[in-house]
Image (cartoon, helix red, strand yellow):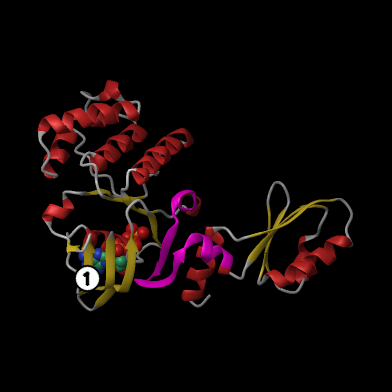
Amino acid sequence: MLKVENVTKYYGDFKAVDNLSFSVKKGEIFGLLGVNGAGKTTTFRMIMNLIEPSSGNITFDGRKINYDITDKIGFLTEERSLLTKMTVKEQILFYGALKSLDNDVILKRLDKLLERFGISEYKDRKINTLSKGNQQKVQFISAIINEPSLLILDEPFSGLDPINIELFKSVILELKEKGTSIIFSSHRMDHVELFCEKLVILVKGKTVLEGYLKDIKKDFRIKRIVIEGDVNKKDLLKINGVLSVNENANGFIVNIEDEKFAKDIFNYLKTRKNINKYVVEEPTLEEIFVAKVGEAYGK
Ligand code: ATP
């Protein structure tokens, strides 16, 4: 289990991470979320032992993270870091060696992974001749060649088409099933919702929301109502408790302050003809994220 306890990081006088605590169990997928500059990369670097926390503790399976332990961590960084003049095989041999693996072990794993990602034919091709999506696959393979116990994925889906997103998703879920602890970071809340059971949202290094996604959604007072039919946006905005009304191709999404205002919307809909749909739903993670980050910025 990864444990981050009361971790603070200063760069000079600037506090980039402020008293952060969370834990990620074996086989759990954890979301570390925040807007640009919130402190996510700084946190990853501290977990990887690349920089020291100013205070607090980070342990994996009860031990302070050192080079032995980082050999068992995989890190897919947001900024791509492939050595593009190398071939795929040379690149993976290089990363595998950094993780203290023998060449024969690396090559055996590489063949399996290339097959899993459907890019076996590119093994001896230079990376700069591969498409962006295939380069991303190579980057992902380099992050998991050490069969990590802890895997950090920073924007793993960037540049991928929907088919490859599905492929990455199934590989990530296989790793979870095998017991890998995974930290996932993305600005795409729909992607975070695909996986993360537990999450933290950071604003300027401080935690503004944490817990299990299921509980966060249940406890969040703002609800969304999906309406399809003949309604008027201006009328909806006048109703008690309505925070916003968004129109899309099918109808309207109305955000209300609290579930108790749903009946006011329902009463309004009774005055309209041709209503095809009225559903009260839990908010999306994106709506929660925007509300929580907005609150923290005093908006
Ligand atoms: P993004 O989503 O844009 O990648 P982030 O959440 O990863 O952002 P960090 O890169 O951890 O954010 O940065 C947190 C804060 O710390 C930012 O205000 C950044 O400018 C600052 N910072 C990061 N690295 C350094 C450094 N080496 N020296 C000084 N300040 C830094």
Rendered view: 183 above or below 217: above
Can see residue 166? yes
Residue 195: give x, y in percent of width and height.
45, 50
Amino acid of disc 1: Asn
Disc 1: which residue: 57
- Which residue shows up at 16% across the image and 49% down it? 71
Residue stretch in magenta = 192-218
* Residue 288 falls in image quadrant: bottom right
- Is residue 87 visible to us here? no
**203 in the magenta segment:** yes
Q: Label 1: state its secondary structure.
A: strand
Give x and y (percent) for residue 125: 23, 24
Indicate the position of residue 67 as horizontal and vertical percent values: 12, 55
- Using the rendered view, name the quadrant where residue 252 is placed: bottom right
Residue 213 image point, x, y percent? 49, 60
Question: Image check: 34 left or right of 268?
Answer: left
Q: Is residue 112 left or right of residue 103?
A: right
Q: Is residue 197 magenta?
A: yes
